[in-house]
Amino acid sequence: MNKRRSFTPKFKAQVVLEVLSGAKSTAEACREYELQGQVLNRWKTEFIEQAPTIFEKSSAQSLDQVRLAELERMVGRLTMELEVAKKVSGILNSPANRNGR
């Protein structure tokens, strides 16, 4: 029984770029990497269709990174506030303060 081969996205991009740049023809790439022409054509189509979204994702990722940094700062501030509240609570509940000394 034949096992299906799987290829990494990096490998697919490398092969497609070789073909699109003219470094290799489709036939040469298929022979060298033992691929079927239909597979390589599908990869090229996907690559070309998704090319415009490459630059859009970077802006979305940067927004996510800004939000993550904001949340991390908030967690740090709340942690410090909690520690201060614990110390104040410990001081106010100490036996010396109960006796009025």
Image (cartoon, rainbow, N blue to C red):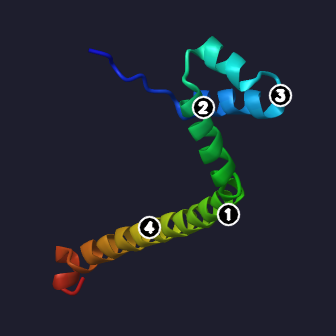
Does label 2 or label 1 sit earlier along the sequence? Answer: 2
Q: Which mark is residue 59?
A: 1
Q: Quadrant of residue 25?
A: top right
| Residue 3 at x, y percent in the picture | 33, 19
**Looking at the image, residue 61 lies above or below residue 19:** below
**Looking at the image, residue 60 lies above or below residue 4:** below
Cα–Cα span, label 2 and label 1: 30 Å
Amino acid type indicated by mark 1: Ser
Residue assigned mark 3? 22
**Looking at the image, residue 73 lies above or below residue 32:** below
State the residue at coordinates (28%, 75%). Answer: 91
Cα–Cα span, label 2 and label 3: 14 Å
Q: Nearer the viewer, residue 70 or 80?
A: 70
Residue assigned mark 4? 75
Q: Nearer the viewer, residue 95 or 16?
A: 16
Residue assigned mark 2? 40
Cα–Cα span, label 2 and label 4: 48 Å
Look at the numbered discs 2 and 4 and tell me whether their residues touch, using CB distance below 8 Å.
no
Look at the numbered discs 2 and 1 and tell me whether their residues touch, using CB distance below 8 Å.
no
For label 2, the crowd category at 10 Å Cα-Cα, with few meaning under 14, some 14 to 19 and many 20 or more, is: some
Q: Secondary structure at mark 4?
A: helix
Q: Nearer the viewer, mark 2 or mark 1?
A: 2
In this figure, what is the number of numbered marks?
Answer: 4
Amino acid type indicated by mark 2: Leu
